[in-house]
């Protein structure tokens, strides 16, 4: 085997540009569906977990206990095992178990409880006095949730979403290994099975760059929304 030089590695990566671009699109699709589902379902779930705690607006030990148990149950599954466990459901929902859409199903299931806990923890940081002041002014429960809780927690929620995005970027790479496509799949197929170290290194660097961009954007937006 000829030694890999910078020039040969660059030429090889240039020839693979269409495949790399396709892998990036597949990763973005998996991540986008997972994050959208997390916000749509995990966000309200986190709010319910917070509001059903003792001393909150809709305190209910039974509801809080059951939802908390379900969230912890899903979070306790290693992602690779969760993917395998959800294969029948994935086949029913999307008609296949291969591809980024199919991989987005277990990603979404994992993202919902993950984000719910992050939302719950963020809301807990809001001083109780803020909510009590809103109640004293006659605010309705919906107004308290939207205009007080979510407004006060918006910076923390952006930070939580940033954490979720970065965490599930690595999950999407794992999904790629078992037929989901994306950057992880490309790294394994070429970097591991075909012994093309340059491809493996390039994909790792690409993931590092993406993570840095996400973290930078999340930090800037959170700082902009922080009213303190």
Image: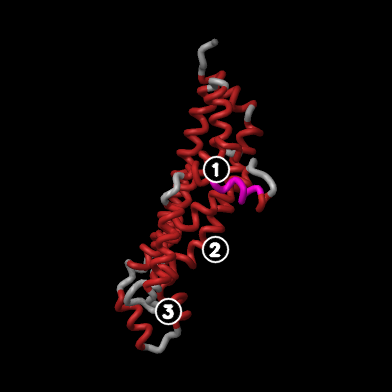
Tell me the quadrant of the picture where the N terminus can be found. Answer: top right
Q: Nearer the viewer, mark 2 or mark 1?
A: 1
- Percent of width and height locating residue 86: 56, 48
Q: Which residues are magenta?
A: 84-91
Return the disc, 3 or 2, that comes first in the chain's sequence.
Answer: 2
- Percent of width and height locating residue 101: 63, 47
> Which residue position is annotated with label 3?
144
Instruction: Depth check: give the residue in front, 206 or 28.
Output: 28
Instruction: Give the spatial CA distance, label 3 vs label 2.
Output: 19 Å
Return the disc, 1 or 3, that comes first in the chain's sequence.
Answer: 1
Instruction: Depth check: give the residue in front, 121 or 155.
Output: 121
The crowding category of the residue bearing disc 2, from other C-alpha atoms within 10 Å (few below 14, some 14 to 19, many at least 20), is few
> Which residue position is annotated with label 2?
40
| In magenta stretch: residue 89 | yes
The crowding category of the residue bearing disc 1, from other C-alpha atoms within 10 Å (few below 14, some 14 to 19, many at least 20), is few
Instruction: Give the spatial CA distance, label 1 vs label 3.
Output: 41 Å
Q: Nearer the viewer, mark 3 or mark 2?
A: 2
Q: Is residue 8 left or right of residue 65?
A: right
Return the disc, 2 or 1, that comes first in the chain's sequence.
Answer: 2
- Residue 84, numbered label: 1
């Amino acid at each position: 085997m000829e030694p890999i030089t910078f020039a040969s590695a660059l030429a090889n990566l240039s020839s693979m540009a269409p495949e790399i671009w396709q892998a990036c699109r597949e990763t973005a699709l998996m991540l986008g569906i997972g994050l959208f589902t997390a916000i749509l379902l995990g966000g309200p779930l986190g709010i319910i977990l917070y509001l059903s705690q003792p001393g909150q607006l809709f305190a209910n030990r039974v509801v809080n206990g059951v939802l908390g148990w379900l969230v912890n149950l899903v979070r306790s599954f290693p992602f690779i095992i969760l993917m395998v466990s959800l294969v029948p459901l994935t086949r029913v929902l999307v008609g296949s178990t291969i591809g980024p859409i199919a991989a987005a199903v277990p990603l979404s299931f994992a993202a919902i409880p993950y984000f719910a806990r992050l939302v719950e923890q963020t809301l807990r940081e809001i001083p109780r006095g803020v909510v009590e002041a809103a109640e004293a002014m006659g605010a309705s429960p919906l107004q308290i949730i939207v205009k007080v809780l979510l407004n006060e927690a918006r910076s923390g929620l952006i930070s939580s979403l940033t954490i979720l995005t970065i965490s599930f970027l690595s999950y999407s790479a794992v999904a790629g290994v078992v037929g989901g496509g994306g950057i992880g799949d490309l790294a394994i197929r070429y970097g591991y099975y075909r012994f093309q170290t340059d491809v493996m290194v390039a994909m790792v660097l690409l993931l590092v760059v993406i993570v840095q961009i996400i973290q930078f954007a999340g930090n800037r937006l959170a700082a902009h929304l922080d009213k303190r």
